[in-house]
Image: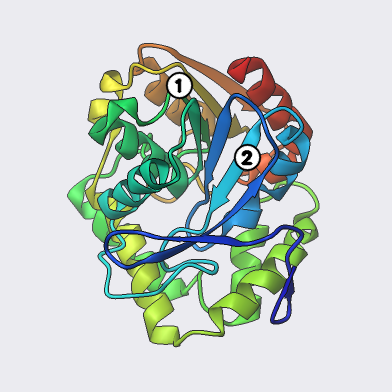
């Protein structure tokens, strides 16, 4: 499917939620289990393309564009983690999905965790790829983090800034994200910059101000956690000069039924950079 200058490999489906928000999503494959993929900050459903391709022969694979992202509606929404979690829950009910495995990357991981905390029955298992929410921040650190994001404007609609932000998510061959940069630039430039900037700021505030670490012990579902050993984004190296493994192990230790896999020679965008490895872990976990 071609949408503007963006060549989508899948049909884009749409459903409208009770708040009037139109949610765009892709729906590929068939199977008794449904993998519902939730993207991270400032990306889109196709950030899971390599996983959909590797898993759709065995499972139904659905990836959504969160409100304010991709081809979903922009609007006067809070863009908080709780808002996104409520969106995911209503989406599950609207489509009548059963046997759901929630899969979230980065901010999407924190959203998935929050969705399960708010409605434990919405999914039977949980997959977390470099999830936000395991790293905790003091009030002073939160302020520093938000100011840094705003100062460096890492998620600008200007293509070079966006390219740098995405490249920092890879350990090897950062140019493999070029197609993503092209798509996201085209999508974002179709909307007013102020709208996009406000959404990003709200998302960052949500990640910082709606922590989940102290409630991870309430997640009873079997959980697969994956981090890249060379993740340059988690933890924030300025505020927390510790290893990604330390952050990952601290979070997993809080969860009653979680398994951790650290993926070597891999950055933050692990489901793309090491898709075959991630897909193998997911298959073993789901089955």
Query: On the image, numbered disc 1 is attached to which residue?
Result: 249
Q: Residues within 10 Å of mark 2 (few under 14, many from 20)?
A: many
Distance of label 1 from label 2 (alpha carbons): 28 Å
- Tag shown at residue 61: 2
Relative horizontal placement of residue 128, taking residue 250 as reference (left or right): right
Of tags 1 and 2, which is closer to the observer? Answer: 2
Circle 1 — which element? helix
Earlier sequence position, callout 1 versus callout 2: 2
* Structure colour scheme: rainbow
Q: Position of residue 20 (x, y in %)?
A: 31, 68
Res. 18 visible in picture? yes
Residue 178: image quadrant is bottom right
On screen, residue 72 above or below 17:
below
Circle 2 — which element? strand
Q: Are the residues flagged by discs 1 and 2 in contact, CB closer than 8 Å?
A: no
Relative horizontal placement of residue 85, taking residue 8 as reference (left or right): left
Q: Residues within 10 Å of mark 1 (few under 14, many from 20)?
A: some
Q: Which residue is found at the position 28% from the left and 54% from the top?
A: 83
Residue 8: image quadrant is bottom right
Residue 59: image quadrant is top right
């Amino acid at each position: 499917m071609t949408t503007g200058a963006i060549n989508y490999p899948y049909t884009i489906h749409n459903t409208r939620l009770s708040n009037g928000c139109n949610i765009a999503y892709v729906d590929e494959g068939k199977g008794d289990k449904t993998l519902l993929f939730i993207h991270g900050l400032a990306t889109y459903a196709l950030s899971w393309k390599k996983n959909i391709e590797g898993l759709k022969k065995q499972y139904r694979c659905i990836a959504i564009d969160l409100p304010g992202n991709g081809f979903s509606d922009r609007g006067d929404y809070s863009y908080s983690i709780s808002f996104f979690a409520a969106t995911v829950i209503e989406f599950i009910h609207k489509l009548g999905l059963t046997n759901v495995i929630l899969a979230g990357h980065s901010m999407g991981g924190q959203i998935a965790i929050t969705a399960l905390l708010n409605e434990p029955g919405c999914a039977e298992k949980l997959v977390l790829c470099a999830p936000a929410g395991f790293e905790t921040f003091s009030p002073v650190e939160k302020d520093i983090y938000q100011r840094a994001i705003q100062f460096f404007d890492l998620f600008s609609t200007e293509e070079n800034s966006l390219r740098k932000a995405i490249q920092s998510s890879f350990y090897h061959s950062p140019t493999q994200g070029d197609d993503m940069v092209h798509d996201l630039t085209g999508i974002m430039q179709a909307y007013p910059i102020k709208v996009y900037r406000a959404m990003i700021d709200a998302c960052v505030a949500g990640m910082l101000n709606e922590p989940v670490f102290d409630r991870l012990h309430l997640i009873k579902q079997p959980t697969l956690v994956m981090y890249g050993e060379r993740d340059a984004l988690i933890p924030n190296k300025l505020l927390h000069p510790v290893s990604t493994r330390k952050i990952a192990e601290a979070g997993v230790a809080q969860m009653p039924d979680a398994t951790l896999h650290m993926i070597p020679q891999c950055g933050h965008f692990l489901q793309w950079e090491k898709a075959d490895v991630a897909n193998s872990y997911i298959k073993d976990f789901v089955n």
